[in-house]
Image (spheres, rainbow, N blue to C red):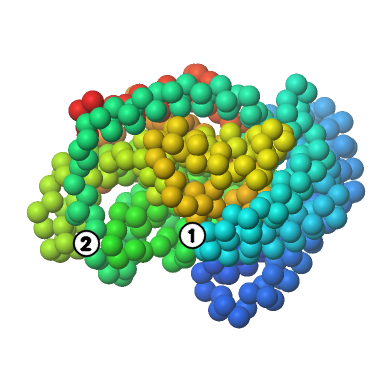
């Protein structure tokens, strides 16, 4: 009888059990956060900050313990163990996480958390008052601290500071690679947006603006989640100000959405987006039949870009398709009654696919969304390197909006003060939104070849084959592959802007005829 390499290595077993404890600690932090965003009474906020920072501190201490480092080193020496591909992938990620966490001095971690939480409060007020000068010194502080953080991590050879931060969200990706993908994307999207603008006439969207009560919207959202095969026995859907998904434990994936009376597709697309994230979380091998991998990198998602590819695929490639509405419109009419009385499939399809430059990223359509991301990527990269000064942020922001989207930014509230990210140090995060769109479109071209009757299935509300495909090709592998490897394994090619452009150009032709 042969013994498996993992069973023969007490060091590896101890390492996995310590990783399990670290992950359990961080999941407690996530649970506290989910509660804060959903049900916690406002007066609980002050003590919740104390609870959350205690858990964060315990997690950091546990994950950077010298014992963890010793075990990693011991396992790396064990040739028999490392010969196993799955173990090698786990070890690669254990090493990477340990290195990153231990490179940051704990006083910098504490300062980032403290200044970040103060800056976020100032940002809220500054945005409310449309006062950039009030926020500017805090933005300066957050970029200073982020520079320090990037220098602790260190840039890859031949790379730049920005890469060190980006690596936290999209491992292995560099600013230069992103630039090489974004540049052709921007040129062709600008052209697309200009062509649409010349048409001068947009689809009628009045039918999306009927007031529909939140409880009816909720029931409809749950029906769609069930069709998508999101497991509601292992998940929930709740209401919050900013929708998110928390895959907080095995058997426990929580989605949130928000309901606006005057636009039912807002909540629907928010729910489908978060459910795309949720299906990824539910598909990770956190509780496997043969071996429980919880806490190991093999049971974690690859990157934010890949995570976002799952959400954007369900929200846009599925949810804004003619086939989806073939199935969903009669059901929406049944649920919402007279509000959707005369709307036909074509009206609905066109209304949810309008392309119109706008000021706010989170409300942007598929055709213009990525331009919002590019503005932020270019600016944060320049701010981090020192090529741009904080005082020039509003003017630089407005200039780019005019240049890329052809619109004037009337005030900073709807301009450079609209996003929360920079206020708490999420720098290097924005590009992952566009990477998600790019991965989604590239995967989709392969999916429609491999599931030939997918469109027919979607028009019948059958999403099982799509979910299984995603589970087999992406979800069940956890972090076994890096994002670029996964992309090549699935599509045979490196990530490129072409599939997304083909998709968007096709859509615009269909909706606007240009
Ligand atoms: Zn998302």
Classify mark 2: helix, strand or loop.
loop
Quadrant for residue 31, please give it: bottom right
Q: Residue at x 55, y 79 (%)?
A: 41
Residue 259 at what x, y percent from top left?
36, 64
In the image shown, does 35 or 122 lie closer to the viewer? 122
To which residue does mark 1 refer?
A: 242
To which residue does mark 2 refer?
A: 210
In this orientation, does residue 298 appear?
A: no
Q: In this view, does 222 lie to the left or right of 291?
A: left
Answer above or below: position of 318 versus 338. Answer: above
Q: Which residue is drawn at 43% across and 50% down?
A: 410
Q: In this view, does 143 lie to the left or right of 368?
A: right
Residue 265 at what x, y percent from top left?
30, 54
Residue 300 at what x, y percent from top left?
62, 44
Answer above or below: position of 341 versus 293. Answer: below
The quadrant in which the C terminus is found is: top left
As measured in the structure, the alpha-carbon distance from the residue carrying label 1 to the one carrying label 2 is 22 Å
Quadrant for residue 82, please give it: top right
Residue sticking out furthest to the top: 493
Q: Residue at x 84, y 43 (%)?
A: 103
Label 2 Cα neighbours within 10 Å, binned few <14 / some 14-19 / many ≥20: some
Q: Are circles 1 and 2 on residues that touch, CB within 8 Å?
A: no
In this orientation, does residue 198 appear?
A: yes
Q: Which residue is drawn at 69% across and 70% down?
A: 49
Quadrant for residue 159, please give it: top right
Residue 340 at what x, y percent from top left?
16, 57
């Amino acid at each position: 009888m042969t013994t498996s390499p993992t069973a023969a290595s007490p060091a590896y077993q101890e390492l996995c059990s310590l990783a399990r404890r670290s992950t359990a600690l961080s999941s407690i932090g996530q649970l506290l956060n989910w509660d804060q965003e959903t049900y916690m009474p406002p007066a609980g906020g002050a003590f919740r900050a104390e609870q959350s920072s205690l858990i964060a501190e315990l997690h950091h201490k546990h994950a950077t313990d010298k014992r963890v480092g010793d075990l990693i080193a011991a396992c790396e020496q064990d040739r028999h163990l490392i010969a196993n591909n799955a173990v090698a992938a786990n070890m690669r990620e254990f090493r990477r996480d340990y290195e990153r966490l231990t490179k940051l001095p704990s006083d910098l971690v504490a300062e980032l958390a403290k200044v970040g939480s103060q800056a976020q409060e100032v940002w809220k007020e500054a945005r409310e008052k449309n006062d950039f000068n009030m926020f500017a010194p805090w933005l300066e502080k957050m970029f200073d601290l982020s520079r320090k953080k990037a220098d602790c991590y260190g840039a890859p050879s031949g790379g730049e500071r920005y890469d060190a931060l980006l690596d936290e969200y999209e491992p292995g990706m560099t600013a230069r690679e992103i630039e090489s993908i974004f540049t052709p994307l921007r040129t062709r999207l600008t052209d697309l947006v200009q062509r649409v603008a010349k048409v001068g006439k947009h689809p009628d969207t009045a039918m999306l603006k009927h007031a529909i009560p939140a409880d009816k919207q909720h029931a409809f959202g749950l029906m769609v989640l069930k069709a998508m095969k999101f497991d509601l026995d292992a998940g929930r859907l709740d209401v919050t100000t900013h929708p998110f998904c928390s895959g907080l434990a095995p058997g426990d994936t929580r989605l949130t959405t928000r309901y606006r009376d005057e636009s039912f597709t807002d909540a629907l697309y928010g729910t489908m987006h978060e459910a795309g994230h949720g299906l990824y979380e539910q598909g990770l091998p956190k509780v496997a039949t043969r071996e429980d991998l919880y806490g190991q990198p093999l049971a974690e998602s690859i990157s934010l870009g890949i995570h976002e590819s799952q959400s954007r695929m369900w929200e846009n490639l599925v949810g804004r398709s003619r086939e989806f509405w073939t199935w969903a419109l009669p059901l929406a009419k049944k649920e919402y009654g007279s509000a959707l009385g005369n709307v036909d499939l074509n009206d609905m399809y066109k209304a949810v696919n309008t392309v119109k430059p706008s000021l706010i990223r989170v409300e942007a359509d598929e055709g213009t969304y990525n331009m919002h991301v590019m503005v932020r990527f270019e600016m944060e990269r320049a701010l981090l390197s020192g090529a741009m000064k904080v005082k020039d942020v509003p003017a630089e922001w407005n200039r780019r909006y005019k240049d890329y989207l052809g619109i004037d930014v009337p005030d900073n509230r709807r301009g450079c003060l609209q996003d929360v990210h920079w206020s708490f140090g999420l720098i290097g995060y924005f590009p992952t939104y566009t990477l998600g769109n790019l991965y989604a479109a590239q995967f989709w071209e392969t999916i429609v070849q491999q599931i030939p009757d997918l469109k027919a299935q979607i028009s019948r509300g059958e999403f099982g084959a799509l979910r299984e495909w995603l589970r087999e090709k992406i979800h069940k592998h956890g972090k076994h592959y890096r994002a670029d490897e996964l992309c090549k394994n699935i599509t045979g090619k490196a990530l490129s802007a072409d599939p997304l452009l083909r998709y968007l150009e096709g859509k615009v032709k269909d909706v606007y005829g240009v």
